[in-house]
Image (tube, helix red, strand yellow):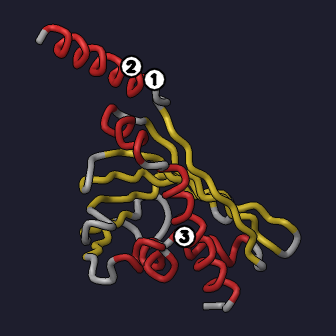
Amino acid sequence: MLPIILALALVAILLFVIIAGQPDEFVVSRSGKIAVPPEKVFPHVNELKKWDDWSPWAKLDPNAKNTFAGPAAGAGAAMTWSGNNKVGEGTMTITDSAPSSLIQLRLEFLRPFKATNTVEFAFASRGSQTLITWTMFGKNNFFSKIFGLFVNCEQMCGKDFEKGLASLKLIVEAGK
């Protein structure tokens, strides 16, 4: 009986060390080029009501409930959503908005798990094109570290960012 208890204790300690050794912070970032200048792309991100047109998560739950607060666009604009298990529930608020160059948001998830992260959209002019970079960063809590052992969150979120940037490109280049 004692050898079994010691083996379980050793496994528990080893597991704790592996989890604790995971990174304390994370960054997910993707970029894409859109064949219009930044001032044509910027409003599609700066006005949260336009996100349903291109957001990859809007397509996962078309029946999600969205509510908006604050100004229509720019700093202080906020959106709260509640949807199925694929999109969860939370709030995002634009905290900084520099026309045609940067949008920063505070992203608060309530469900399926609680987390608060920062999201940035950087817009850079490249001739007649826009290089847009979508980045999310934040802290990994103990639960996030455990989850990260089984799911590659950078790859998972990165694929969603790529889908969103591709949808945004289609919409903006079509002039919608």
Contact between labelled residues 3 and 1, with CB atoms less than 8 Å apart: no
- Tell me which amino acid carries mark 1: Gly
Name the residue that disc number 3 marks: 45
Q: Residue 40's x, y, as percent? A: 68, 78
Under circle 1, the secondary element is loop
Q: Residue 28's x, y, as percent? A: 56, 49
Q: Residue 144's x, y, as percent? A: 36, 40
Which residue appears at 53% of the width and 68% of the height?
46
Residue 130 higher or lower than 49, as above or below: above
- Tell me which amino acid carries mark 3: Val
Q: Residues within 10 Å of mark 2 (few under 14, many from 20)?
A: few
Choose mark 2 or mark 3, whichever is in front: 2
Question: Going by the picture, which residue comes out furthest to the left?
Answer: 1
Name the residue that disc number 2 marks: 17
The image quadrant of residue 57 is bottom left
The image quadrant of residue 155 is bottom right
Contact between labelled residues 2 and 1, with CB atoms less than 8 Å apart: yes
- Tell me which amino acid carries mark 2: Val
- CA–CA distance in space, label 1 to label 3: 36 Å
Under circle 3, the secondary element is helix
Under circle 2, the secondary element is helix
